[in-house]
Image: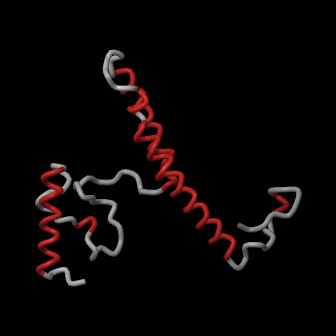
Amino acid sequence: MDNKSIELISEREDLEFILKSSVPGLVSDSKRLTAISPTTTSPTHEASGTGHKLLVEPSVFNMGILLPPSLTFLNRLREVVPPAADIATTTLTAFLDEFLANVFVPQLDETLAELCAQTMIESDAFQQDPRWASHAQKPVFKV
């Protein structure tokens, strides 16, 4: 793909215009979608589309770090929203419920399946661990 083609530049400018007009602050003028640029070969954890620094590496195994503060925030939100408001309390957590069911669990399943497959494929996967006696009463496989 030619990054300097007129068609690609035109499409990129149209996309930036749409993003700037619909979600202000999502794309800054100085960063021209560098975080999702096709020329990027490795993910940079220092930059994103908004110029924020990522504090936690994006991984399904980091949900233990991210979920407790999110739940604390949502519980506090339930306390702050007045009971007379027209907002059902279930709608406050609906996005988190949908995220967990539709994004997190499938990604976790996929990641665990890949790790298990990778472990079973290794040449010494089913060899006995030489130190098994210090860990168990019966032989243990290296994994």
Q: Nearer the viewer, residue 65 or 99?
A: 99
Q: Quadrant of the N terminus?
A: bottom left
Choose top left, top right, bottom left or bottom right for residue 4: bottom left
Give the residue displayed 14% in from the left and 78% down from the top.
Answer: 7
Q: Position of residue 8 (x, y in %)?
A: 17, 76
Total label count?
Answer: 0
The quarter of the displayed image where residue 128 is located: bottom right
Colouring chosen for the image of the structure: secondary structure
* Residue drawn at x 61%, y 64% as measured from the top left: 113
**Image quadrant of residue 141?**
bottom right
Residue 137 relative to residue 53: left or right: right
Q: Position of residue 143 (x, y in %)?
A: 70, 67
- Residue 116 screen position, x and y as percent: 65, 66
For this rendering, which residue is in front, 135 or 102?
102
Q: Is residue 115 left or right of residue 16?
A: right
Spot occupied by residue 119 in the image (x, y as percentages of width and height): 66, 70
Residue at 79% across, 73% down: 127
Residue farthest front in this picture: 86
Position of 14 relative to 100 (above/below): below
| Residue 24 placement, left or right of 44 | left
